[in-house]
Image (cartoon, rainbow, N blue to C red):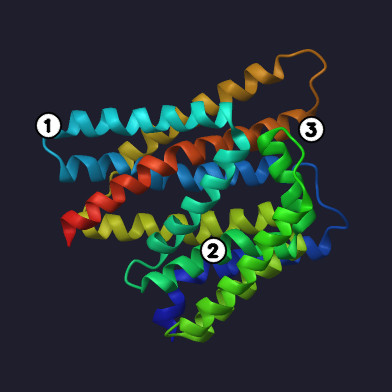
Amino acid sequence: MRSVVKPYAGFLLGSVTVLCAAIWAVEHSSLLIFVCSVLILLAGLPHGAYDWVIMRAHYKKGQLGAVVAGYVALVLSVIALWLIAPQTLLIVFLAYSAYHFGDSDLPNASLLHQVTWGMAIIGLPGLLAGADVQALFSVLTESSIASAPITALGIMGCIAAFTHVCSAPERWVAVGLLVAYGLVCWAAGALAGFACYFALLHSPIHLTRWRHALNQQGTATILMLSLVVMGAITAAVWMSAAEPAVTFETINQTTFRYTFIALAALTVPHMVLLSNANRRIH
């Protein structure tokens, strides 16, 4: 039992901590969006930066240059498409994120088990913190979002969660993780729930698995590349903050928007690389 729970101990402990903080706080702090955005970046960038270690391990010099060029081209393409059609890209981002979360968190599970896990992570906040999700999506796309799609997303998440639990080999583990995630979303908000999941479950599991598979820590590479991306996002937020009459709320929203645009842009080549790397390993 202990060995089954151990990979998720950080997530469960973090969820309890956030729940206690949410119960203690009378209302959500105005710092919540900023803190969660920074936490997502600090947790997400290291496991994304490890892609360079994976590339070096699987491709020779000639191939490596082409792979890196393709990786950067995909990043820039996603950023350009997001700026042109943010609502469309948001839908695509949610769909491929759901697949990626299942594939990465449960690499040895069946396709049904993987997909339903990812759909539950993406969809449950729409059911448990619908107004919160609606507001966050509006900030991301810089346009109003109707409540009906959020409701539909929540229903899909609920169905996916039920299906995932029913198909789980260790049902009590699936129930515990989804209940913890759902409670944090409900009590502290969708962004806090996702930050807990992303920082304390998804990223550590991914990084640990690939470090073990390649027997390489890549600490210096992770630090350097993470600092580069953090610097770029900080510079973008700083330039936005230089505009007249800027408020802290504007900085909050800008930090959140740029964080998720960066995640969207990096997730596409990240998924393609991991898919190819998995095929090479197996």
Q: Mark 3: which amino acid?
A: Glu
- Closer to the eye: label 3 or 2: 2
- Taking 120 as reference, is 194 above or below it? above
Residue ID for mark 1: 61
Q: Residue at x 73, y 60 (%)?
A: 151
Q: How far apart are the two marked residues, 3 and 2, measured between alpha carbons?
A: 30 Å
Query: What type is the residue that disc 2 sits on?
Result: Met
Q: Which residue position is annotated with label 2?
A: 119
Near mark 2 (Cα within 10 A), the count class, few <14, some 14-19 or many ≥20, is many
Q: Secondary structure at mark 1?
A: helix
Task: Quadrant for residue 37, please give it.
Answer: top right
Answer whether residue 14 is visible to the viewer in this image. Answer: yes
Relative to 78, is 124 on the left or the right?
right
Q: In this orientation, does residue 18 appear?
A: no
Up the image or down, 6 lies above or below 225; here it is: below
Say which residue label 3 marks: 249
Up/down of 261 relative to 279, above or below: above
Please give the name of the residue rendered at 68% of the width and 40% of the height, measured from the top-left corner.
34
> Residue 250's spot in the image, x, y percent?
76, 29
The foreground one among 186 and 219 is 186
Is the C-beta separation of discs 3 and 2 under 8 Å? no
Asked where in the image residue 53 lies, by quadrant, the reply is: top left
Task: Give, as a three-letter code, the residue at label 1.
Answer: Lys
Judging from the image, what secondary structure is the residue with disc 2 in?
Answer: helix
Percent position (x, y) of residue 219?
A: 32, 43
Q: Is residue 264 above or below residue 276?
A: above
Which image quarter holds the N terminus? bottom left
Left or right, 274 with respect to 121, comes to left
Residues at marks 3 and 1, CA–CA distance in whole angstroms: 46 Å
